[in-house]
Image: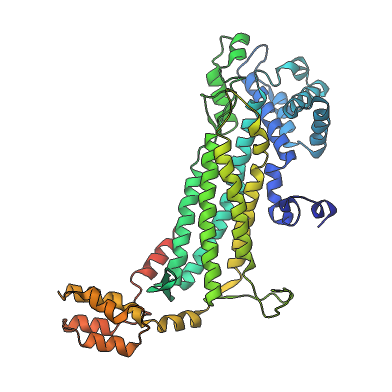
């Protein structure tokens, strides 16, 4: 850990930096500037393609030059833009001035002669909303979904290895009808998989339509151009986003709220999962791998704590708190624009960072645990009372009245053994076939279709 990390205020930039460093390419100040440069550069190119003003379709040399401005954008370029910002006190204007300076200093006469066409018709929010849209799209495609897929894959292997491992359920924390460990893990896998797909389906929107969303200056500058189509083609074809034609000065951020809310759902599922795994570890249903030099407690040498799941739970809560704020705050702006969203948007990467950190911790935790088959089986073998459910169902099938009430009187709140259950079954006035079926039941084989359901889900991507 270097000195900057030691003195970082946010733990994502300090203690956990090595685990979320991938987000520097998407959400750092340098990344935001790079995305702005990309938007501005590609907008200039789009104006050339549509021959706005005196611009003409770019030749190969110009295409190559503009591409290099994006692909070879460097730390020194970031520093130059930040230096300009100190003078302008405006971050987007600093990018515009940087590009104009680069155009003047280039060896390309076309660029030198059309310097003023950079940032043409744009308000700062035209650039910012598209930059953030690109950031959130890339974070989803390159970071969050791959990490979710990794977690789902780890779960898949755990499910397949424990699909038939019978386990007592605990509805309301009390012994209930048996399941299998794999089936319980499969429940979470499905929830994660479905929520991941909903998250992927969120449309990422963008706008480029001027100061109040009406193309006012564009129409005056060139009334013959189809500005709606130019804007659409730029946003959808050049940037790979979806155009929002109906805006004020700002893209209203409704899609960011949906994006945030879907992440909150994922976070909440993950909290539920981490708490259950933590509880199963507490019951002894999972053993934890021991790292030789790791310390579990500063005073109790025997401890091996489920710290990865605890860490994940805490960070998921932090992420959701921010995301829930985004989903309510960002939708509200006075008249055509106020600036209260600006400082909030700069924190989106923090929320993403805490989710990423939690997913990583959960994967780490899962790789350190293994089912304790002996403990799980022993607990199940001591709960014959759970067979009260199938017994009363068979009694109902055979037309015996008050079946539920009779089993309630016999079993409610009691810890029953095999002998008591078998005596009860033997004395029932039911068919010989049904009696034999009930007598063959064990808590360990009373799992219904749990194994089949677990394996079925495990095979789904």
x 54%, y 59%: residue: 271
Viewer-proximal residue among 398 and 231: 398
Point out residue 190 in the picture as x, y percentages from the top left corner: 45, 58
Visible residue check, residue 164 = no
Q: Is residue 121 left or right of residue 382?
A: right
Point out residue 176 in the picture as x, y percentages from the top left corner: 38, 73
Residue 301 figure quarter: bottom right
Q: Is residue 85 left or right of residue 338?
A: right
x 16%, y 81%: residue: 430
Point out residue 185 in the picture as x, y percentages from the top left corner: 47, 65
Above or below for 138 versus 128: below
Visible residue check, residue 257 = yes
Q: Quadrant of the N terminus?
A: bottom right
x 74%, y 31%: residue: 69
Above or below for 461 versus 30: below
Viewer-proximal residue among 396 and 360: 396
Residue 332 figure quarter: top right
Viewer-proximal residue among 455 and 82: 82
x 61%, y 9%: residue: 220
Point out residue 142 in the picture as x, y percentages from the top left corner: 61, 47
């Amino acid at each position: 850990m270097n000195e900057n990390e030691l003195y970082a205020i946010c733990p994502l930039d300090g203690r956990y930096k090595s685990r979320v460093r991938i987000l520097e390419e998407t959400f750092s100040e340098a990344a935001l500037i790079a995305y702005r440069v990309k938007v501005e550069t590609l907008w200039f190119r789009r104006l050339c393609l549509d021959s706005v003003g005196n611009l003409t379709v770019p030749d190969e040399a110009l295409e190559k030059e503009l591409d290099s401005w994006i692909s070879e954008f460097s730390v020194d370029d970031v520093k130059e833009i930040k230096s300009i910002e100190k003078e302008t006190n405006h971050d987007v204007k600093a990018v515009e001035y940087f590009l104009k300076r680069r155009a003047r200093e280039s060896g390309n006469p076309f660029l030198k002669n059309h310097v003023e066409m950079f940032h043409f018709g744009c308000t700062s929010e035209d650039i910012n909303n598209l930059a953030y849209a690109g950031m959130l799209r890339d974070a989803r495609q390159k970071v969050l979904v791959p990490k979710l897929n990794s977690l789902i894959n780890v779960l898949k292997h755990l499910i397949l290895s424990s699909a038939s491992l019978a386990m007592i359920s605990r509805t309301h924390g009390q012994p209930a009808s048996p399941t299998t460990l794999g089936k319980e893990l499969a429940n979470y896998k499905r929830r994660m998989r479905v929520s991941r797909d909903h998250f992927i389906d969120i449309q990422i929107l963008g706008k480029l339509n001027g100061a109040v969303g009406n193309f006012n200056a564009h129409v005056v500058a060139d009334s013959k151009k189809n500005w709606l189509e130019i804007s659409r083609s730029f946003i959808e074809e050049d940037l790979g986003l979806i155009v929002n034609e109906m805006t004020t000065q700002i893209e209203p951020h409704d899609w960011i709220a949906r994006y945030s809310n879907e992440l909150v759902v994922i976070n909440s599922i993950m909290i539920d999962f981490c708490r259950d795994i933590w509880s199963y570890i507490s019951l002894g249903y999972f053993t934890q791998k021991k790292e030789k030099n790791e310390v579990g407690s500063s005073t109790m040498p025997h401890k091996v704590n489920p710290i990865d799941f605890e860490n994940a739970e805490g960070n998921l809560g932090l992420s959701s708190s921010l995301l829930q704020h985004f989903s309510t705050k960002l939708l509200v702006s006075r008249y055509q624009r106020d600036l209260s969203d600006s400082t909030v948007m700069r924190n989106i990467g923090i929320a993403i960072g805490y989710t990423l950190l939690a997913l990583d911790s959960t994967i780490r935790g899962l790789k350190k645990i293994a089912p304790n088959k002996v403990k799980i089986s022993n607990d199940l073998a001591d709960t014959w009372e759970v067979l009260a459910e199938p017994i009363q169902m068979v009694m109902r099938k055979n037309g015996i009245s008050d079946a539920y009430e009779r089993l309630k009187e016999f079993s409610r709140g009691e810890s029953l053994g095999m002998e008591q259950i078998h005596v009860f079954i033997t004395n029932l006035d039911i068919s010989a076939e049904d009696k034999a079926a009930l007598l063959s039941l064990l808590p360990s084989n009373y799992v219904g279709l749990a194994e089949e359901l677990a394996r079925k889900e495990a095979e789904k991507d």
